[in-house]
Image (cartoon, rainbow, N blue to C red):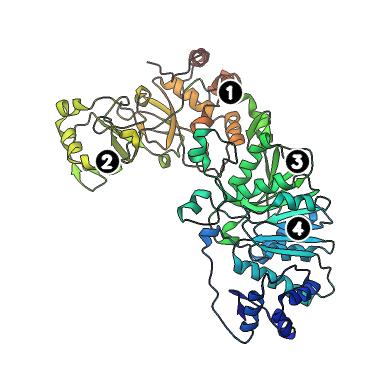
Amino acid sequence: MICFETHITNSSLKFFQKNLKTLFDFNQINNIVREVSGINTFFTSQEEATELLEKLKENSSIVSEPNRREYGDFQTNENLAEQVAKYAFLKQKGFEFILEPTCGKGNFILASIKQSNSLKKIVGVEIYQPYVWETKFKILDYYLINKETNKPEIDIIHGNAFEFDYNQLAKSTSDLKTLVIGNPPWVTNSELGSIDSKNLPKKSNFKKHSGFEAITGKGNFDIGEYISLIMLKSFENHNGIFAFLIKNSVVKNLIQDQKRNCFKISNSEKLNIDSKKEFNVSVNACLFLTHLNTKPDFTCKELDFYSQEYLTTFGWYKEKFVFSVSDYDESSIIDGKSIFTWRSGVKHDCSKVMELESVNGHYVNGLGEEINLEKKLVFGLLKSSDLKTDKTNTYRKLTIITQKKIGQETNYIKENLPLTYQYLNSHKEYFDKRKSSIYKNKPNFSIFGIGDYSFAEYKVAISGLYKSTHFTLVSPKDSKTIMLDDTCYFIGFDNHKMAQIAHFLVNSDLVQKFLKSIIFSDSKRSINKDTLMRIDFERAFENYEFENVKDFISDLTHEHWKEFGEMIKNNVNEQITLF
């Protein structure tokens, strides 16, 4: 039978049919339910009890599903909930108090009940009313079948997790061994705000960002992170465990911010789950489990949830936030400041016009048009997907480079390159449609990510989109430099041997181990300029001798090696190019 938009099992149905007359007095039926299951205030009003009474004569109804997006709703299946609860109870025995701040359909609460007879109190909070009912009926059904099982005091509360008074709850349960368990919403505040969701916390700069960061991207936070922080702040002094299914990015933030928050947590574990299998969503997620009321710790072990295979330990080490403590310990000598300035490639936001292919001696643009241009401004172009080999001087695409530096006037194109100007001007509408403010009040056909460094003959480049830390040496084609797009990072040289040495160093075991130790592979842009600027070339160079390197670089002489060593000792901040 369906009532309150949820299914009532046969056991519960028979129970209420047996106690049909008591439904006329919701206080009386509440007392009976409490004796059977431990649930306080099963019905909050006589209207609710009366609705069930009327529904008992009906056979079917339709259950409406909630907007999963509005609630960040990815309900944990019973099997996963039981595995999580079992793991938490293995980590610590004798839990007396269970809290689930977003209890959904109650699978975690029921899984916890099945694990122990020592429980004294359970509290679940849920904003979606039908889930509140489903949780109550599940618990009732369990105790109707398992009559001899210990019955803790249970409160399943219809309320907003962001407004509930957890501090008061923490005070009243401070002497109970505690398990805070659950699966908070996997959405951000801006995602919920975009659909006018009511399931939002009050606006606050809860991570104490500076004024600018608070109103830009860093002011956008994950709801699961918000709830996790509330739980840790409220219950850090409880003897117990915190165990949440949350996104990997949230765990990374919690451990990174632990340096500032100093919550009384330790022995933290991040156990990776298959969210496609468990929730049918493509999100990197895990079980984050940590022990409460301990000396603050600043690292976290990463394991596979299903096999418990150890993967890495990440967190704060030697005053740095790293992905692998062990790898960083072996390679931290490299962590410094790059003598070379890493740059991103050219940005134009007009690929249909600016990017070309060479077909039968003609250029073809992204609109399929065959065009004739002077060759002067046409350069080979590499994208992230092209940086898979060790070395290259070939390309699939070409691009038009209209400027040698940002803001340069482009009138010269009309005067000196009539075919190029005619082509660009005939497609001016595409340039005018570019939305980025960086093009505002700039010369016609402007591009960005351009400067003297862009025209270096040789480039040591890496993809900014992929997870690989492999670097590619890019050489000129027909004496003309090859450009990179803005998904790539590079350093440039006009001396082949100097570029080869730099290329060797960044691909060396030591630098590769260092990069892998600081890069979180599941980040959206795991490789970025800040990361690359930490490569100390002088330290990397000092780690190798000429004799160890000469076999890797053809025709390398001791003079070349010495020249590179002298070059990197120059204390400069700008990109070094050799003419």
Residue bearing the label numbered 2: 356
Q: CB of mark 4 within 8 Å of CB of mark 1?
A: no
Q: CB of mark 4 within 8 Å of CB of mark 3?
A: no
In the picture, residue 257 is in which quadrant? Answer: top right
Residue 184, image x and y in percent?
62, 55
Quadrant, the N terminus: bottom right
At a point 16% along the width and 29% down the height, the residue shown is 414
Going from the N terminus, do you reach mark 2 or mark 4 first?
A: 4
Q: Is residue 574 above or below residue 271?
A: above
**How many other residues sit within 10 Å of disc 3, few (<14), some (14-19) or many (≥20)?**
many
**257 left or right of 359?**
right
Residue bearing the label numbered 4: 98
- How many numbered marks does the figure carry? 4
Q: Nearer the viewer, mark 3 or mark 2?
A: 3
Type of the residue with mark 4: Ile
Going from the N terminus, do you reach mark 1 or mark 2 first?
A: 1
Which type of secondary structure does the marked residue at label 3 adopt?
loop
Query: Alpha-carbon distance for marks 1 and 2?
Result: 40 Å
Residue 529, image x and y in percent?
49, 31
Report the disc number at residue 264: 3
Going from the N terminus, do you reach mark 3 or mark 1 first?
A: 3
Which type of secondary structure does the marked residue at label 1 adopt?
loop
Which type of secondary structure does the marked residue at label 2 adopt?
strand
Q: CB of mark 1 within 8 Å of CB of mark 2?
A: no
Type of the residue with mark 3: Lys
Residue bearing the label numbered 1: 336
Residue 186, image x and y in percent?
57, 54
Query: Alpha-carbon distance for marks 2 and 4?
Result: 62 Å
Q: Nearer the viewer, mark 2 or mark 4?
A: 4
Is residue 203 visible to the viewer in this orientation of the structure? yes
Going from the N terminus, do you reach mark 3 or mark 2 first?
A: 3
